[in-house]
Image (cartoon, coloured by chain):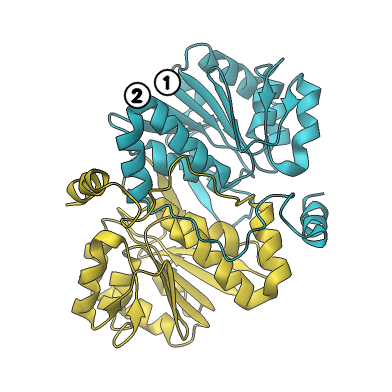
Chain colours: A yellow, B cyan
Amino acid sequence: MNIAILLYPDMTALDAIGPYEVLARLPEARVQFVAEQRGPVKTDTGFLGLLADYAISEITQADILLVPGGPGDEAVRNNAKLLDWVREIHTNTRFTTSVCSGSLILGAAGLLKGLRATTHWTRLEVLREFGAEPTEERVVEQGKVVTAAGVSSGIDMGLRLAQKISGDDIAQAIQLGLEYDPQPPFDVGSPAKAPPHVAELVRTAMR
Amino acid sequence: MNIAILLYPDMTALDAIGPYEVLARLPEARVQFVAEQRGPVKTDTGFLGLLADYAISEITQADILLVPGGPGDEAVRNNAKLLDWVREIHTNTRFTTSVCSGSLILGAAGLLKGLRATTHWTRLEVLREFGAEPTEERVVEQGKVVTAAGVSSGIDMGLRLAQKISGDDIAQAIQLGLEYDPQPPFDVGSPAKAPPHVAELVRTAMR
């Protein structure tokens, strides 16, 4: 099972690494990190480089395509070569997936027309530009197109995909192996739960 | 605020990237990924390279030291040069931290003597070899030494550190920015919650 994860400058690392850490542990999984060109890709903080072992020209098929989000999504949405690649890979995937604003890239590639979808909570309305219907669910399944909400939601999406692909025992073993028993110090991880002034801090920072 | 994250071959990526994604968003944060030598470091699945922008010889101070875990921990525990570096950095940190079996590296460096500590649930008893007292808490604070349990627990540790360093508003804004509102498909993320046959699957896989 080939899992292609798209890397691009100014992406958010956890969008990719969360689901990667789950999916790489599926039986027979082979994960391929792919970017427009091979080599290091600097993520959005400027502090971390992830290595793309493959150029898009080298990857013509994937069972799972994962598109992460991040401030760099806009450049990808304006890059015809990358959008062509996303569309081409999508034609033969078992699952085409995104985390955070990665769904805006799927949208720009024309893959979300008429579908419910999600993205980072600050960007939900942008989905309408691509003919998608924004929803506030954390993981949204529409046939083979699966979109997840902001950043950390990719871990939950990864486990859902693991369950669909390999069943409950394997998915649960992966969750236990990663000791994913979340205990955040606060319960403020969605705009519905966070104090309004905290939500405003985030909106300001992301403008 | 300088945050040094140690990279080494066969580490588990999410151990580092989970807390990195939180801590990099603190005001004035500068994250430095550091390894024995500069350059790409292959993580434990064999599918992902992380880039170390710094060699340990270039980093002589950090406010936060973060040591991730993974199957490569044993080689680090037998690498006197790396252990010397960990000890040296520790002398002037504000927080010395680990995720998963990273605590065994702190232990091998002699930093856990007489302290309560945690690690991946399959490795808890190993902590005793280093004079530490294993506990099953997800994040264990002992003065400036903070250890977290398996893999994904680093996100929770990162948020706790964010709260201590920058207060509730900033920590909550980071949590909301990362949309960390966990909704795993199962509630099996600790050995106490998982079915015994699932725990056995994990134990077998990690032997």
Look at the image and tell me whether residue A116 can be seen: yes
Residue B120, compared with residue A156, is above or below; it is above
- Left or right side of A182 for B202: right
* Cβ–Cβ under 8 Å for marks 2 and 1: yes
Q: Quadrant of the N terminus of chain B?
A: top left
Look at the image and tell me whether residue A79 can be seen: no
- Rendering quarter of residue A171: bottom right
- Left or right side of B136 for B5: left
> Which numbered disc flags the more N-terminal residue, 2 or 1?
2
Disc 2: host chain: B
Residue B72, compared with residue A17, is above or below; it is above
Mark identifier at residue B1: 2
Asked which secondary structure carries label 1, the reply is: loop
Asked which secondary structure carries label 2, the reply is: loop
Camera-nearest residue between B141 and A60: B141
Mark identifier at residue B63: 1
Q: Residue A136 at what x, y percent from top left? A: 34, 69
Label 2 and label 1: CA atoms lie apart by 6 Å
Residue at 51%, 61% in the rendered image: B183
- Rendering quarter of residue B115: top right
Q: Residue furthest top?
A: B91
Q: Residue B26 at what x, y percent from top left? A: 33, 34
Residue at 70%, 43% in the rendered image: B71
